[in-house]
Structures are given as C-alpha cells and as structure tokens.
Image (tube, helix red, strand yellow):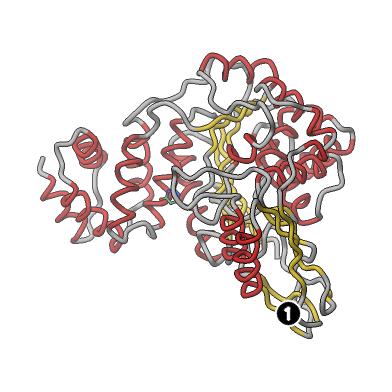
C-alpha cells in the first residue's frame, strides 16, 4: 500500500477502506508517513468528505492508537458526556451528580479551559484541596464507591488525535465535520464508557455557529457511536448567550451548588434537566419524560447535591465551601459594568464574554498560562431583560483594576441594547438519536 494512492483516491472522491485508513493512522503515528502527506489527505477529506463507514473506521483506528481505558471492572452502565465547549458551561458538574445519585456510573475525563471556553477541570480545581490528577486505581475506586469521579485527561489517550489535530490546526482543515466528529468520538471511545451523551453547543459562543451545522456534527458523531457499538445521543443546546449568570471558575462552582439546591438560573436548570434526562435514558432508567421527572426530583430532594459533595470529598476537596459559598477566596477587585442606554438587552456576543473572562484571569490563552480561580463575570442582566441607563449589567471580578478596565471595554462592545424585546430562544434546540432529529422549537 502507498500513501500516495490513498491521497489520490480521496482526492478523486473515492471511499477509503478500513485497511487504507489503518495504514494511514498507524503510519502517521509511527512516524513513517510525513506531515506533508497527512496534510494532503486532510485537505482531500475536507473537500470530499467521508462516508459514515469511513468516519467510523477512522475513529476506531484513532481510538486504538493509544491506551483504551477498560471500565469493565466497574459494575453497572457507564455513561460519559462531552460538550463541544461554551461560556459558562458548568453542566457536567450538575448532571453527573444527578445521574450518579440514581445509580448511573460516571467515570469522566475532562479538559482544561483554552481560549474563550472554560474547562471543567479548572472549575473543579477552584475547590480547595480537590485533586483532578488521580491514578487509574483511585479513579476507578471512587467511581465504584461514589458512582462519579471527574479527573483531567491522563495517560496516552488517542495520540493519533493529538498529532492530527496539531496538523489540522496549521493547515486550515479543522472545520471539517467528519474530521471534528472523528477527533471527538475517538477520545470518547478510548475513555471507555458504554454510552455517550453529547452536548453540541450552537450560537455565537460555540464552535458551531448555526443549528444546522450543529445538527450535522451531532448526526456524524451519533452515527459513529452507534456503528461502533456505543449508544450515543446528542442534544443541540444554545450558546448564543452565556449559560447561567456565572462565568469563571469559583463563580461557576457557586452556581452549580445553587442549581443543585433548586435555585439555579432558569436557562442553566432547563439545559441540565434535559441533559440529565438524556443521560438517565441512555443508562436505561426509563423513557425520556420519566427521566426528566427523576432529574427534577433528585434536585428537589437534595440527593444530587449530596452526591456532588460526596464526589468532592472523595477527590480531596473541602466540601465546606459548597455549603457556604462565601468561604471561596474573593477576587481583590470588583467593578460594575453599567448600561449606557435604556431598553432591552437584545443580544450578547458570547465569544466576547468568554474573551473578557480570560482577560480578567479566569482562563488561559496558552496552555501554560495560570488561572485565577476567583476571577470572572457575574451577569446581572440576561438577554431579554429590561435595562435602565446606569443599571449594573455585570460584575467583573479580577486581581487588578487594569484587567477589569480591559474586560469592561470588551463587554461594552459585546452587548446590544435595543428598544424591542428579542424573541425567546429555547435552551435546547434539538435532540439527535440513531432514529433521527427531533427539533424542540
Ligand atoms: N474539538 C475536538 O476535540 N476536535 C476537533 O477537531 C474540534 C474540536
């Protein structure tokens, strides 16, 4: 087999066989196929696309390029969850305890924030003492005992994706639905869970800006999961506005606690109930409506919050900050962003809100950057709210006045105030399963 022929076949619109895809992945990871040939293939795929069969075969070979986590020693159905990333997205820390409080096993590896989107691992590490770097044995023991454990990505998981993603990043081939789908699903499959819930964000703060593109990505990922024997469901959820009111690590943990105590913002609560319901449904706990009711009940009866505390304690974290959020370290400087005019908050450029939070110190532009856990933004006004001139729109939290000033300028450009109220947007746009797409609008 020759890499030249594989590139030419895809360039001419042919369908690659599993053997050809294996030859490519093994050769590329093994250093026998050079970057220039891999780039040419990525560009051919970008233009020609891939069939569902090719996408599934490529995903499996990528997943098998490194360690495949084996969760079979943990009893029960293991359900994983992945979000394509957003601003204020703290759903993992709400829905995983809900699911675990009903006996579902959640053995989850999460990422750190990069660019305008936050990461679950950073949010968790804002809890004093909590460890997200655990060896496999401890990770498994906590899942067995508590039902849920969330750690940072560790081990040699999917080296093929690490190499290919870095290549796609510099060859303008990231924005390909089959390549994004294989990249995400290879990591989920290697992480070992039986069932996979995908939260595909859509809108100005998301990777996918339109519902149409988000559905295309979701369909591609659901098809991969089902073809390789992992039941997979995707929800398309709104990221045209930040989720909830808190953006920034410790601030988001406080909002997680409020939501699990039944006092969370309505948009965040609605998204979490839908995600938790789909997670429970995937785990075989019942029909979707019954699972929705179960999720709501686990919040109301306090069992989901108790499960979060159990997980935090098992990972070495100080649970007293969860009971009393005022114990979290406070930001040195706070500053109110005031409305410059009267009307309705009509729209927010959500990506810019994420960028403003990075400016405050809540995120990182480069992998090596340190994060200030107390930094972030509390949104006083949400899209659709009436605003009076001079009223606080947001509170900025940071270590310096200078950072607050920079973030304020970004936020002022990010909001649109108009005299008319915007149309209401659903928190969840669609649900994608192997049977098709159900739109919620
Ligand atoms: N996120 C991923 O993990 N992979 C992609 O290709 C794009 C986004």
Q: Is residue 318 visible?
A: yes
Q: Quadrant of the C terminus?
A: bottom right
Determine the residue positioned at 75% across, 74% down. 345
| Residue 94 at x, y percent in the picture | 72, 40
Q: Is residue 328 left or right of residue 58?
A: right
Q: Position of residue 358 (x, y in %)?
A: 57, 55
Q: What is the count of numbered marks?
A: 1
Image quadrant where residue 185 sits: top left
Determine the image quadrant of residue 73: top right
Q: Secondary structure at mark 1?
A: strand
Q: Quadrant of residue 198?
A: top right
Say which of 317 and 41 sits in front: 317
The residue under the point 82% across, 79% down is 389
Residue at 50% x, 63% y is 213
Quarter in which the N terminus is drawn: top left
Name the residue tied to disc 1: 417
């Amino acid at each position: 087999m020759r890499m030249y022929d594989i590139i030419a076949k895809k360039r001419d619109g042919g369908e690659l066989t599993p053997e050809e895809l294996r030859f490519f992945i093994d050769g590329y990871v093994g250093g026998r196929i050079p970057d220039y040939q891999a780039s040419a293939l990525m560009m051919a795929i970008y233009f020609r696309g891939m069939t569902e069969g090719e996408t599934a075969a490529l995903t499996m070979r990528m997943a098998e390029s490194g360690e495949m986590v084996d969760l079979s020693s943990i009893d029960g159905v293991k359900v994983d969850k992945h979000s394509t990333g957003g601003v204020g997205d703290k759903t993992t820390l709400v829905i995983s305890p809900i699911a675990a409080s009903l006996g579902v096993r959640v053995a989850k590896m999460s990422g750190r924030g990069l660019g305008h989107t936050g990461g679950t691992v950073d949010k968790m590490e804002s809890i004093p003492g909590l460890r997200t770097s655990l060896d496999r044995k401890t990770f498994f023991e906590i899942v067995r005992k508590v039902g849920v454990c969330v750690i940072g990505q560790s081990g040699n998981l999917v080296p093929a994706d690490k190499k290919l993603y870095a290549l796609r990043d510099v060859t303008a081939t990231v924005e390909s639905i089959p390549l994004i789908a294989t990249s995400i699903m290879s990591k989920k499959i290697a992480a070992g869970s039986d069932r996979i819930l995908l939260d595909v964000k859509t809108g100005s703060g998301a990777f996918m800006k339109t519902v149409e593109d988000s559905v295309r990505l979701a369909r591609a990922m659901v098809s991969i999961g089902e073809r390789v024997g992992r039941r997979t469901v995707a929800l398309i959820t709104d990221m045209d506005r930040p989720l909830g009111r808190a953006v920034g690590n410790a601030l988001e943990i406080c909002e997680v606690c409020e939501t699990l105590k039944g006092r969370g913002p309505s948009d965040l609560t609605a998204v979490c109930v839908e995600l938790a319901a789909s997670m429970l449904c995937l785990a075989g706990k019942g029909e979707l409506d019954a699972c929705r009711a179960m999720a709501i009940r686990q919040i109301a009866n306090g069992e989901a919050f108790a499960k979060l505390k159990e997980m935090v304690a098992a990972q070495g974290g100080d649970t007293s900050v969860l009971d009393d959020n005022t114990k979290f370290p406070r930001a040195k400087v706070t500053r109110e962003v005031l409305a410059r005019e009267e009307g309705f908050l009509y729209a927010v450029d959500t990506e810019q809100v994420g960028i403003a939070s990075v400016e405050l110190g809540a995120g990182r532009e480069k992998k090596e950057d340190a994060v200030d856990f107390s930094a972030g933004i509390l949104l006083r006004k949400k899209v659709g709210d009436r605003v009076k001139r001079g009223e606080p729109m947001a509170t900025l939290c940071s270590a310096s006045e200078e950072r607050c000033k920079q973030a304020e300028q970004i936020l002022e450009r990010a909001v649109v105030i108009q005299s008319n109220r915007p149309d209401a947007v659903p928190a969840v746009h669609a649900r994608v399963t192997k049977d098709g797409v159900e739109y919620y609008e």
